[in-house]
Image (cartoon, rainbow, N blue to C red):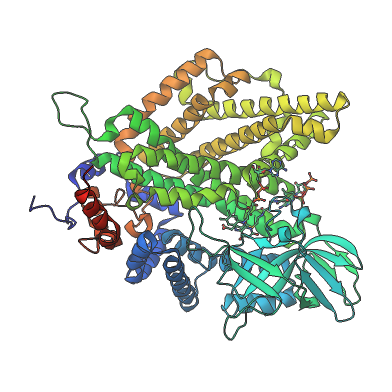
Amino acid sequence: MSEITSSIPLQINPDLQEERDKASFNVTELTHIIYGGIEKTKKRKRLEKLLFSDPFFQEYQNVRAFGSRSEYYAASVKKSTKIFKLRRQHKWTDEEYETVLDICHDDLALTLHHTMFIPALERLATEDQKSKWLTLAKQYKIIGTYAQTELGHGTYLQGLETTATYDPQTREFVMNTPTLSAMKWWPGSLGKSSNHALVLATLIISGKKYGMHPFLVQLRSMDDHKVLPGVRVGDIGAKMGGNSVDNGYLILDNVRIPRNNMLMKNAQVSPDGKFVTRGPSKANYATMMLIRVQICTMAYQVVSSGATIGIRYSAVRRQSKLDPQDREPKILEYQTQQYKIFPGLAMSYAFLFASRSLTRKYEEAFAEIQRGDFKSLPELHCLSSGLKSFCSEHSVRQVEIIRQSCGGHGYLNAAGLGMLVNAAAPMITVEGENTVMYLQLARYILKRFAGAMSGQQLDGSTSYLSMDPATYVCPVMSETDCRNLTALCDIYRYRSYMTVCRVARQVQHDMESDMPQHVAINKNLVDLVRAAKAHSYYIVVKDFVEGVDALVASAPVIKVLRTLCCFYAAHGIAEYSGDFLESEAVGLHQLKWIKNLQVSLLGEIRPDAVALVDAFDYHDITLSSALGCYDGNAYERLFKSTENDPMNKEEVHPSYYQYLKPFMEEMNKSKL
Ligand SMILES: CC(C)(COP(=O)(O)OP(=O)(O)OC[C@H]1O[C@@H](n2cnc3c(N)ncnc32)[C@H](O)[C@@H]1OP(=O)(O)O)[C@@H](O)C(=O)NCCC(=O)NCCSC(=O)CCCC(=O)O
Ligand SMILES: Cc1cc2nc3c(=O)[nH]c(=O)nc-3n(C[C@H](O)[C@H](O)[C@H](O)COP(=O)(O)OP(=O)(O)OC[C@H]3O[C@@H](n4cnc5c(N)ncnc54)[C@H](O)[C@@H]3O)c2cc1C
């Protein structure tokens, strides 16, 4: 017993080393592919070194794990200011800054300043306004947030009640919160941190409403951070996760702001109160689209972090017996354990390729939009809405499965998985609740399908809706065909086509039976979401297959990625087999072969599992997990983590003297 200490051994756990020694491919090569080349990997490493050489980042982990809400928030404000200072000092580009956020968890109290306030200024302000406010924001002379959601409405933006009424006499807008449900509620960094907010409000001129527009409102004094007259602002309370961020409420009592504080890139109000608009009516929704694209990348980071923890731990944890004559096996040997974790591993790579493809499309479309060409906007809105929903839904679910696969220890904060799940859970809600976003995609798909039916030539992600379903024959004719990635992709495409076709015909039939359109739509909402999910699944599989096909890499790397891609596609067909059978994308024979393949691929992935997560190259501080550390010394790290637990500060806890001692005394005296 006396030998038990909480010091961490210097060497790598031999069980983990054994895994690394048998990898079939070069891990560094794959890391370079993941980060976009050797130079980017090197830059990432440099940034990691710069950040983590500061002991604050290690201490921060303790506050995160054991601090009170207020302490965690304060530490996160400190972390934000440190990172902002470094950003200015090193003149980081947006890409470098995003890398920094990936490296050190984006749990910055002031996160909204960079994730939404600055992008919104960039997208919604005129050049003149940018030269003033964007400059101030980029120099951190003002700190801002994006205040759109209200207590009564988050989804339905036309229902927002905050008003911005133009007063032509003074050439000001009067910003007002007319009802309880109109108060802003949820914006990040609003409660305590920001001194400015971009408030999205309904514009009113001479009693007429002109829809939602952005207004820059100062909330707090630049001298002492006190709340300005007419403004009431505060924190909305503790949440399931993300408690470093002060999501806030905001009430504006007829606060006057100059006319020029309306961001007027997309619509203008002239001094005498004339409203002029240019570009599409949804141009003011631009910032949300950007974040939806980014959520896909975040979903990749979440699921790849979870897979790293789950796989490394499963390679060092031994439990029960397989061969009664042998020692207890690593839990990674159990097929069921592989079946719980490898879908997350394959999903990580699927989302890497899908988010990369979406980001590329976004950047191309954004460049066009900047030139005044909005033709790609509807496609991009729908693609990003669908993929945001798909990636967030699947990654959060998968990480929870991984957490469960780590048994009891997965439930500890020190495992890092609970925090990962709780911090990721809002991805499902923010920037458009997933069901609502799937329905945006479904609406687009229905229109495109109708276009295809009337002979229109479709392009973009829905071009397959012009296919002739009569020509479809399941491309899997034998068990060996199941490994053909193009064939698997075709199966997804046909399943999506049939799911869309079925619901489109049903909606049409209901409308032809004299059902009002909104009733017909509501009657079919579940199937519309199903169609949007089927389409999104197809896009992700297609991006994965095309991404791997286009890779220039060594044969072993290509082989292992093709195996993962095949597993990802086969697993999805097995999991949603009902849908695939119902749409006749596969028959019973094919399904059986694909299910068999799925299980046999578990065994093929197994030898490379640790190497495949090592390739994500997450720093131990980034993972924040005793179970998932690179050295695999999970037990030592778990024990070590108890040292910082405030519960262990005193040998006898004060509650003993207060409650337990008197209770014990009373019990001991009692005659009963
Ligand atoms: C659900 C909709 C899209 C509905 O919008 P609506 O104005 O009621 O429109 P509608 O009459 O239904 O017409 C829809 C029409 O508008 C189009 N559209 C909708 N959004 C966009 C867009 N971004 N780009 C381009 N087009 C867009 C749709 O495709 C429809 O087009 P159509 O009429 O079919 O041709 C909208 O209300 C919405 O976006 N709601 C979600 C609200 C949201 O995302 N809030 C985010 C708040 S900020 C946040 O959460 C930050 C989190 C930060 C963090 O912590 O990480
Ligand atoms: C952690 C976190 C951070 C946030 N940060 C910000 C921020 O910085 N700035 C900001 O402005 N907002 C922020 N929000 C708010 C967020 O954007 C909204 O919560 C989100 O858009 C969902 O809106 P809601 O809450 O009104 O949900 P609701 O719309 O009330 O959703 C409730 C249910 O109703 C269903 N529903 C609603 N409408 C429809 C429909 N048309 N068809 C079918 N079903 C429907 C939904 O599917 C859901 O099941 C944040 C929220 C969270 C949780």
Q: Would you place residue 100 above or below residue 415 in this image?
A: below
Which residue reaches farthest left?
2
Q: Where does residue 75 sit, x and y in percent of width and height?
A: 42, 70
For the point 51% across and 30% down, the residue is 572
Residue 195, located in which quarter of the rendered image? bottom right
Which residue reaches farthest front?
671
Question: Taking 69 as reference, is 178 left or right?
Answer: right
301 vs 494, nearest the viewer: 301
* Residue 137 visible: yes
For the point 59% across and 46% down, the residue is 388
Q: Would you place residue 388 above or below residue 648 in this image?
A: above
For the point 83% across and 62% down, the residue is 278
* Residue 33 visible: no
Q: Where does residue 184 sit, x and y in percent of width and height?
A: 67, 62
Which residue reaches farthest bottom?
223
Q: Quadrant of the C terminus?
A: top left
Question: Taking 213 as reference, is 364 left or right?
Answer: left
So how many labels did they put on this image?
A: 0
Residue 392, located in which quarter of the rendered image? top right
Q: Where does residue 554 sit, x and y in percent of width and height?
A: 38, 43
554 vs 490, nearest the viewer: 490
Q: Would you place residue 196 above or below residue 388 in this image?
A: below
Question: Taking 307 as reference, is 359 left or right?
Answer: right
Q: Where does residue 166 sit, x and y in percent of width and height?
A: 85, 72
